[in-house]
Image: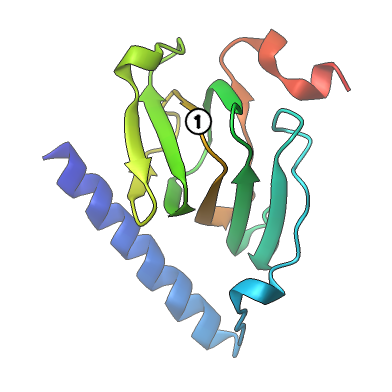
Amino acid sequence: MKVASLLAIGWIVSCGIASFASAEDAHTAITPNEVKWGPGPKTLPTGAEAAVLFGDPTKEGPFALRLKLPAGYAIPPHTHPGLEVDTVISGTINLGMGETADRSAAKAIPAGGFFALPPGMAHFAYFDEETVVQLTNIGPWSIKYINPADDPRKTQ
């Protein structure tokens, strides 16, 4: 029942984003070769790359952001204040729930997979291969690490 609820929430958010975009007469069309990668946000461990496809993740409103995570990359346990709606574009994300990074409890979600997490749900991720994940959410997007020592902003 919880999975169905999360999928329904993701669908509702997606419809809301489509409605917002059409209401604002927004038009964005990007081919894979046109994606412009840059450094990942400072809220993530070093090594991530990011490409904003639509909107601005730091401001209120819809956005689409792709993250490219290298093989061997890990994101420690954390939460987000808003709904997290993600699609795996390539590679595989190993996604686990909880406040500790118990890799044995993670679920591998390959390319074409999808997940939606409610606000405040503690989770972690690790990547055995280069992986691209697309976040299609409502901003502002932020991250709060369960263990403040894991926050890369504290070491930069």
* Among the 4 quarters of the image, the one containing residue 103: top left
Residue 78 visible in rendering: yes
* Among the 4 quarters of the image, the one containing residue 108: top left
Locate residue 126 relative to residue 48 in the image: left or right: left
Residue 119 to residue 149: above or below: below
- Residue at far bottom of view: 25
Regarding mark 1 in the picture, which secondary structure is present there?
loop
Where residue 4 appears, x then y in whole percent? 16, 48
Residue at the location (48% across, 53% down)? 90
**Residue to which mark 1 is pinned:** 128
Locate residue 53 relative to residue 99 in the image: left or right: right
Residue 85 to residue 148: above or below: below
Where residue 150 appears, x then y in whole percent? 67, 14
- Residue at far right of view: 156
Rendered-image quadrant of the N terminus: top left
Where residue 57 appears, x then y in whole percent? 67, 54
Residue at the location (61% across, 57% down)? 65
Residue at the location (71% across, 28% down)? 45
Where residue 75 appears, x then y in whole percent? 58, 26
Residue 12 to residue 19: above or below: above
Dot 1 amino acid type? Asp
Locate residue 30 relative to residue 83 in the image: left or right: right
